[in-house]
Amino acid sequence: MLQEVEGYFAKWGQEGIIDLKHELSQVLLLISGRCLIGKEIREKMLDEFYALFHDVENGLNLINLAFPYIPTTINRRRDRARSKLAEMLSEIVRSRMSHDQTEEDALQNLIHSKYKDGHSMTESEVTGLMVALVFVGKHTSSQSCAWTGAYLLNDIKCLVAVIEEQKQIIKKHGDQIDYGVLLEMDTLHGCIKEALRLHPTTPMLIRKAHKHFTVWTKEGNEYNIPAGHTLVSPKIFNNNIPSIYKDPRVYDPERFGSQRKEDKVGGKFSYTSFSGGRHACPGEAYAYMQIKVIWSHLIRNFELKLISHFPKTEWSKFGLEPKGKITISYKRRQLVAWYLLPQFLNVSLFRDFTINYIRMYIDIF
């Protein structure tokens, strides 16, 4: 993951202007190619895979939630792309199985997985789950990463706090970034979490009641839910309840700190951006890890400024992504080198080297 991020942003120039949404989408696809799909797609077919996946993403409109098979041009293109993606993945599955090839990626885990009764997954099931995994690993993280960046670059207080946190981590760990270091990025974590509270990756949670139950509200109202009925929980409302979140429309990452813990005020389902209960999103830690790796790298290596207006929400999409481009300017810097230099200057090794160098210079001349 870190190698993909470093390699991608190494291609940026010394300074420039870019569309942040596009750049984040690209690097997250590279990460998905490395961690989920495998080297075959990553090394040989990534451009084609990206184009097809883009067609699938374009079909994620709200109207398709109710009418998924409307014969529009976008939906026809979506269906063709989905079939082609399945073909590409099926070829990889067959190739690995015929050559007894084993790789360290999510695709290989699905190939070797078995049901409780012992039978293996079918080729169609493997490819279908892989398309779904890439979607949740790339598409949802892309919009979450973009919203996080938009808020950081629009809020100087939060940006300074995140930069200061990176300085402290650099002083402690140098340029090393691993899972343990990522867990220490509490300020950045809060910024991501708050962006997701205001802009969850999906607008609602949908569940089916397997048995009859009754719900009582704090106002004393009683609701009977019959078995077989479908329930919808709107995350965009749940995450903005004034009795739980102070000034819910305000971007305030500190609300999750130890002093306030607003995500616990209303119980374990106060914060539902990653759902909750037995069906909570299993990729939550993976999503935070991706976004932390990307934004810690960007903050350490670039001065960033938001040029375009703060984006509005694209309500026509099923995923609540930023509408239009997010135009930013960048200029390279070396936060790691700058904050490690004072430590280097204070060590005795550098002092002794300097003294010996001066003595050698005097002896020569």
Image (cartoon, grey):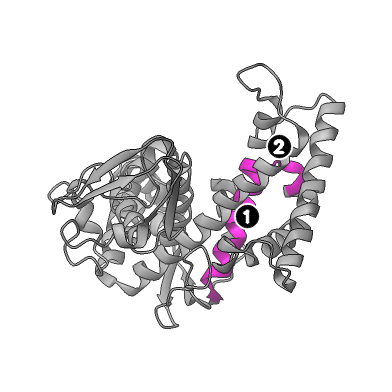
- Specify whether 25 is left or right of 353: right
**Residue 10 visible in the shown view:** no
Residue 149 image-quadrant placement: bottom left
Q: Mark 1: give few (<14), some (14-19) or many (20+) Cα within 10 Å.
A: many
Question: What residue occupies the far top of the structure in this picture?
Answer: 118
Q: Position of residue 285 (x, y in %)?
A: 43, 41
Q: Which residues are magenta?
A: 18-41
Among the two numbered marks 1 and 2 on one chain, the one whose residue lies closer to the N terminus:
1
Is 112 in the magenta?
no
Quadrant of the frame with the C terminus: bottom left
Please report the residue visible at 56 percent of the width from the left and 49 percent of the height from the top: 137
**Residue denoted by label 1:** 29
Number of the front mark, 1 or 2? 2
Is 28 in the magenta?
yes
**Residue denoted by label 2:** 125
Quadrant of the frame with the N terminus: top right
Q: How many marks?
A: 2
- Looking at the magenta stretch, what is its main secondary structure? helix
Residue 100 image-quadrant placement: top right
